[in-house]
Amino acid sequence: MVKVAATAAVDLSVVVPVYNEEAVLGPLFTRLYPVLDALGVCYEVVLVDDGSHDRSSQLLRQQHALRPDVTRVLLLRRNVGQHRAILAGFAESLGRRVLTLDADLQNPPEEIPKLLAAMDLGHDYVGSIRQERQDPTWRKLASGAMNRLRERITGVHMTDQGCMLRAYDREIVAAVLDSQEVGTFVPALAYLYSANPTEIVVAHDERAAGLSKYPLYRLINLNFDLITGFSLAPLQLFSLAGFAIAAASFVFVFYLALRRLVVGPEAEGVFTLFGILFFLCGAILFGIGLLGEYVGRIYAQSNGRPLYLIRTQLRPRFDATGVDE
């Protein structure tokens, strides 16, 4: 549950999911904390280690020892994925406003004041669009195509769905946590609950160090989750396509029957029939796979398993409850 009663003392929570990022954590801390100190507000940094196998958790502990006044560290028992790690950070954060930031420094921490300025204008959700995106060409093209497809299917308007530098009002965070969805895309879910969303343009840099945690397969899987989690349109479109194919097949079979009666037996059209058969088989297999995506979501949701388990929590000094092991 969300700690709503305690949020009055903390103006801003910055949630940073971390997974095998030991090479970049030092530069991240060096740049992030001065930016937040300069804001002149009461803040906390919520660092969520998503089951890293390198020295990331050790570095997070060290950072808590250096800045125990404003640092909260969550060490999850196992890797559960970026969005579940963010949900863990949301659940433990106390800020009136909550901001998410990737650890890889592709979104500079110096852009944080821009998002807060947009919230000062009355927006309860602030998304971001990467300016001059520093990614491989194939990744830009694939991301652009999926953005357009996702927006048409789901109705969720996010110009740049891959940018995690985003700001949320506490009420939006509470609504996202109350959803308890197993496979969810946090920015899209927050957009659905927002009354006055907006987007701003932010700088984008090359990854400071380490490797991307989203190879091609994970990107495809993420977009499947996003589309099937927010719309029934794929199933409905496939149903319409199935009806159209069935109608066309009936007409074609009727035509072949008439032709056999008029012309007689023919062998020349065998390969045409094979081509049609392969097409129909491919369409059927695609439909079964699509249906499987939805059934899989139902199966995962019905299990009722916890989205994440916290192994250790190091709390800020202002939180008198101390350390949980």
Image (spheres, rainbow, N blue to C red):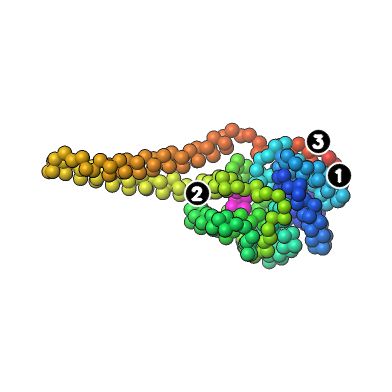
In the picture of the structure, the residue carrying the numbered disc 2 is 231
- Determine the image quadrant of residue 325: top right
Q: Give whichever of discs 2 and 1 has the lower sequence position.
A: 2
Q: What is the three-letter code of the residue carrying label 3?
A: Glu
**Is residue 149 found left or right of 58 in the rendered image?**
left
**Is residue 36 found left or right of 149 in the rendered image?**
right
The structure residue drawn at horizontal position 68% and vertical position 47%, both measured from the top left corner, is 86
Q: Give whichever of discs 3 and 2 has the lower sequence position.
A: 2
In the picture of the structure, the residue carrying the numbered disc 1 is 320
The part of the chain drawn in magenta is 185-190
**Is residue 162 found left or right of 66 in the rendered image?**
left
Mark 1, residues whose alpha carbon is within 10 Å: few (<14), some, or many (≥20)?
few
Vertical placement of residue 137 versus 22, above or below: below
Which residue sits furthest left?
A: 262
Count of numbered badges drawn on the protein: 3
Q: In the image, residue 207 lies at what x, y percent?
A: 69, 55
Question: How would you classify the magenta stretch by its main secondary structure?
Answer: helix
The structure residue drawn at horizontal position 44% and vertical position 45%, both measured from the top left corner, is 235
- Determine the image quadrant of residue 199: bottom right
